[in-house]
Image (spheres, rainbow, N blue to C red):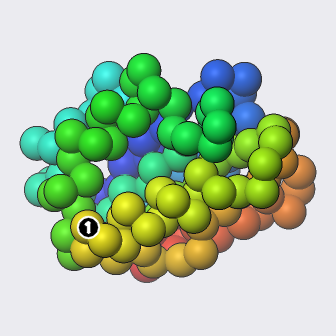
Amino acid sequence: MKKIAIVYWSGTGNTQAMAEAVLAGANAAGAEAVMQVPAEFNTSALSSLDAIAFGCPAMGSEALEETEFEPMFTSLVGALGGKRIALFGSYGWGDGEWMRSWEKECDDAGANRVCDSVICNEAPDDAAIQSCKALGTALAN
């Protein structure tokens, strides 16, 4: 059974709804998955995990949330080499630039993104929820 963490930050509940769908997909695929907020996660947890889903909405001028999520992520990005990960998040403006920048940062660190990232505008619709469940399944396989 694969151990998976879904580490997310949500200000309005949109990214939390996405995280819950990732959790449902991972658990349905037989993984042992848990949801955590940035304060609960650090690099020491990486070695015990088979995969990690990171979720963060676009903030400001299409950037990761700067108070909690970005500092946590920056502290562990150097340890993501070879780690199976997936990314997801919501946005309210722009064109998804924050996700493309985030993907590049993960790729440059040598992380193994197991599937396409999932983004949605505002609250996730049924298609976004299904994509998040599929993301969780991909991490579990």
Q: Is residue 77 above or below residue 82?
A: above
x, y percentage for residue 126?
Answer: 88, 56
Q: Is residue 2 above or below residue 9?
A: below
**Mark 1 closeness class: few <14, some 14–19, many ≥20 residues within 10 Å:** some
Q: Which residue is mark 1?
A: 109
Res 56 seen here: yes
x, y percentage for residue 83?
Answer: 25, 69
Along the line of sight, the residue nearer the viewer: 50 or 90: 90
Q: Residue at x 53, y 46 (%)?
A: 55
Along the line of sight, the residue nearer the viewer: 98 or 5: 98
x, y percentage for residue 118?
Answer: 66, 62
Quadrant of the image occupied by residue 31: bottom left
Task: Farthest residue to the front: give it.
Answer: 61
- Quarter holding the C terminus? bottom left
- Please indicate whether residue 46 sits to the left or right of residue 13 in the image: left
Q: Residue at x 37, y 30 (%)?
A: 38
x, y percentage for residue 119?
Answer: 71, 57
Under mark 1, the amino acid is Ala
